[in-house]
Image (cartoon, grey):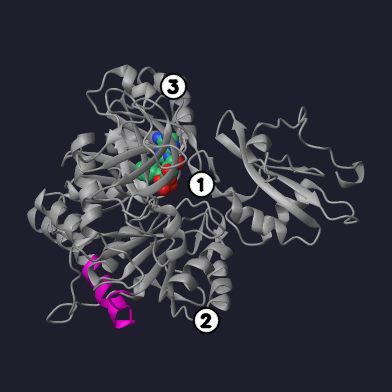
Amino acid sequence: MADPAWLPWPAEFAERYRAAGWWRGETFGSVLRERAAAHPDRIALVDPTGGRDGGRRTWSYGELDVRADRMAAGLTARGILPGDKVVVQLPNTAEFFEVVFALFRIGALPVFALPAHRRTEISYFCSFTGAAAYVIPAVHGGHDYRELAAAVRAEVPGLREVFVADADPGDFTALAEVPLDVPAGGLGHAPAPHDLAFLQLSGGSTGVPKLIPRTHDDYIYSLWGSNEICGVDADSVYLVALPAAHNFPLSSPGSLGVLYAGGRVVLCPQPVPDVAFPLIESEGVTITGLVPPLALLWTEAAARTDRDLGSLEVLLVGGAKFSEEAARRVRPGLGCTLQQVFGMAEGLVNYTRLDDPEEIVVTTQGRPISPDDEILIVDDEDREVLPGESGHLLTRGPYTVRGYWNAPEHNARSFTADGFYRTGDIVRMTPTGHLVVEGRAKDQINRGGEKIAAEEVENHLLAHPAVHDANVVGEPDPYLGERTCAYVILREGAGELRPAAVKKFVRERGLAAYKVPDRVEFVSAFPKTGVGKVSKRDLRTAAPADAPALVPAPPHQH
Ligand code: OOB
């Protein structure tokens, strides 16, 4: 069923990708069915804290398959139909997979929210997609999602159902009450391989996040393509350390890649060494993926741990630039092979290969999955740069989308007329064909892998009655790589305002905590470019103490 808000690949490209064998004509629902038939008793999921007594729980492929069917039947009975959108905000628990595979079976589209998202983001996802339902934990990480759901419900009356993956659902429906026997004759509809499977979130550089429409065909290609490159097979044990819904731990090769291969997925409730290392030891984890700050933390902690990490063969690091020095420490520290991964939820994923020389592994961000990934590196006028020079990365290919969901204006800016995605990344290509990420042209802060659109935070700052103008930029941080600094000009006569009050204001607007500026600096003017626009580049390089371009604010404003 074609979604009118989605731009599919032009027919000649779709035919080419099918003929090349990249698109195999499978759906997530059919893949799970086949794996369950082939090896019903093999363990698919290990949820170390998900049991009734808070202990370890495992689901075999057969059990996951039956659960997905029953959940699909129950959701259908509650009016979730093919093409409906369902915002899924679940932590790293087995229920995440039960719900998501049930939606895949129905042909309803999960919209993948992160546990960190709050009222503003979730209300936007629900209203923008016209979501039929929203799925939450009761409490996670000290946050009560039922309160969040109540606030979202009040803002988005069209949201019909809230399901709570917990015994104590409050005013909503417990997920455990949903499953039903599948009616004779099945669910009545099975999605086609070229149909949309879900909407993924974009890191974004605009005022509101954009949604990325992915099909069964294209996403499944990125899974098995990743599996081949990362050596994932039925013996692989993948630890989901990052939030399960993020594209990296979901598909590079991630939980879905490992399930495709018939391997085992272990869910890690928190990505810290104290939680992850015992799981690596007890579950025999062979592969996992981390953002650079966590990779650093793990490498340091490995030197002091009593845990045996010997089963770990591959550590994937990506989401943000991994420094060469840190990359060099991975093998000696953790005793495993490093693979750098430079990917994006819009599609293109690059990996260093397992047999690449060490120098390439520590100094590049890899090369694309597919021979059909087209890479262009261009200057500001879209002309290709000379080989080895750096420029804007544009890409097109069998698992890179042709447009955001329901966003024609953004699409005109983010995609070229012939369908290349403008990644916003500045890269160069080495003679070996590997990409090195040199910087970013998009107005985004990459805070240790978490993406923050400057404009989104600026809009919230501008809503403060005392704020005249605001600019948000990234500044170097030794641990996160980058952190956010908000430069704020106060209104004349606004009186006193402290940085902490500005942060509190942003938090109370209902934004994810990682978007709250790390630092707030009051100024009386912004540095300008030659043509009189605010120069974010000068703001970025303006260290607080020696900022010649910045006129210090009058003392009463500090
Ligand atoms: C991953 O996906 P997103 O959508 O959260 O973010 C994509 C952006 C890229 O355009 C780039 O700016 C940055 O994140 N990025 C990297 C990087 N990996 C991602 N920048 C430098 N070095 C890297 N290794 O972040 C994502 C998706 C799939 C796999 C891995 C990461």
The residue where tag 3 is placed is 324
Q: Amino acid at mark 3?
A: Glu
Q: Is mark 3 within 8 Å of ligand 1?
A: no
**How many numbered marks does the figure carry?**
3
Q: Is mark 1 within 8 Å of ligand 1?
A: yes
Residue 380 part of the magenta segment: no
The residue at the point 42 percent across, 59 percent down is: 411
Q: Amino acid at mark 1?
A: Lys
Q: In the image, which is nearer the foreground, mark 2 or mark 3? A: 3
- Which label number is shown at residue 157? 2
Q: Say whether residue 424 is left or right of residue 222.
A: right
Distance between the Cα atoms at labels 1 and 3?
21 Å
- Which label number is shown at residue 501? none
> In the rendering, at what x and y percent does residue 254 appear?
30, 45
Q: In the image, which is nearer the foreground, mark 1 or mark 2? A: 1
Pick the quarter of the image with the C terminus.
top right
The residue where tag 1 is placed is 451
